[in-house]
Image (cartoon, rainbow, N blue to C red):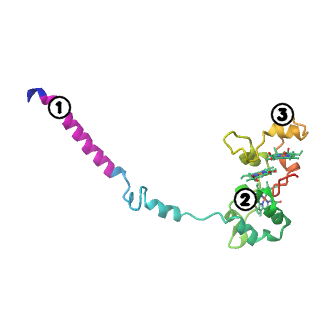
Amino acid sequence: MEHTKHIWRAFLILGALGIALMCGRHFAVPDSFGKAGHYRYDSLKEMMSRPVVHGGSKSCKEGCHDHEERFAQYAKGKHQTVSCEVCHDPVTYHVKDGEKIADMNKRATFDLCAYCHRKIEGRPKTFPQIVFLDHLREQDVPITDEIPAGICFKCHDVHDPAIE
Ligand code: HEC
Ligand code: HEC
Ligand code: HEC
């Protein structure tokens, strides 16, 4: 017995740690965890209580922009899969109860294009990507130190950007 003391001590310490762990878990894990899967069930209600801000391109069309030439262009152009709200703002910032409440944001700078078209190795090879300076040089645009903010719009219509 005398010679096995250290083993009992180790068991005692392990047991104490186990109990501490279970107590800690009891207080740290939220009540609704595991109710319907490996996640906190109450988070669903919290997500659902957040206001809906996006309406989708359909809301712009059905709202006011259907008659515009711009929409027809967009609908057949290369950007037809890009939602209006990606480049502008969520519709609820602009319209409330059918009334216009604020101007829509329009980010007419090359940063907007860079977001999707700047060449990044990780992007699918089939997606149109450019190195901005090379692209502008190829198009004979005289570039000094800085790229002018609105340069892409000189040649590309943002709602129908392809140049045949
Ligand atoms: C790829 C980004 C992009 C998408 C997608 C897009 N827009 Fe635009 N839109 C812009 C930019 C940038 C401007 C400003 C262009 C300029 O000044 O030459 C603009 C301008 C406009 C304007 C003119 C605003 C003004 O004050 O002159 C309207 C209206 C508009 N867009 C509506 C729409 C609608 C409706 C959709 C969806 C059907 C849409 N846009 C989709 C980027 C986009
Ligand atoms: C949110 C992402 C997004 C933004 C922002 C965006 N584009 Fe696009 N663009 C796309 C997608 C998606 C396509 C369609 C790609 C395809 O057909 O494979 C496209 C296609 C194009 C094409 C046609 C390429 C071809 O196949 O001939 C051009 C040109 C273009 N975009 C220019 C622009 C310019 C200029 C801007 C900035 C004003 C811009 N894009 C902003 C997503 C975007
Ligand atoms: C002087 C005119 C001009 C300017 C300015 C210009 N482009 Fe272009 N762009 C073109 C032409 C023409 C083509 C089609 C021929 C080609 O692919 O080289 C094109 C093609 C593209 C393509 C498709 C490339 C592909 O691989 O299919 C993208 C994306 C694009 N431009 C984005 C931009 C962006 C972003 C800017 C702003 C930094 C910009 N362009 C500025 C004329 C221009």
Q: CA distance from mark 1 to mark 3?
A: 73 Å
x, y (%) of residue 112?
75, 49
Tell whether 59 sits left or right of 153: left
Asked if marks 1 and 3 touch (Cβ < 8 Å), the reply is no
Which secondary structure lies at badge 3?
Answer: loop
Residue at which label 3 appears? 145
Quarter-of-image position of residue 15? top left
Q: Quadrant of the N terminus?
A: top left
Residue range corresponding to the magenta coloring: 4-26
Point out residue 123 in the picture as x, y percentages from the top left corner.
68, 44
Instruction: Identify which amino acid the numbered label 1 is placed on.
Output: Ile
Instruction: Residue at 83% x, 71% y: name it.
Output: 67
Q: Residues within 10 Å of mark 3 (few under 14, many from 20)?
A: few
How many numbered marks appear?
3
Which comes sooner in the sequence, label 1 or label 2? 1
* Front residue of 109 and 73: 73
Identify the amino acid type marked 3.
Asp
> For the residue with label 2, is its CB less than 8 Å from the closest atom of ligand 2?
yes
**Mark pair 2, 3: CA separation:** 34 Å
Q: Is residue 33 above or below residue 152?
A: below
Q: Position of residue 128 (x, y in %)?
A: 76, 47
Q: Is residue 149 magenta?
A: no
Q: Main secondary structure of the magenta part?
A: helix
Name the residue tied to disc 2: 81
Residue 12 is covered by the magenta coloring: yes
- Mark 1 surroundings within 10 Å by alpha-carbon count, few (fewer than 14), some (14 through 19), many (20 or more): few
Residue beneath disc 1: 7
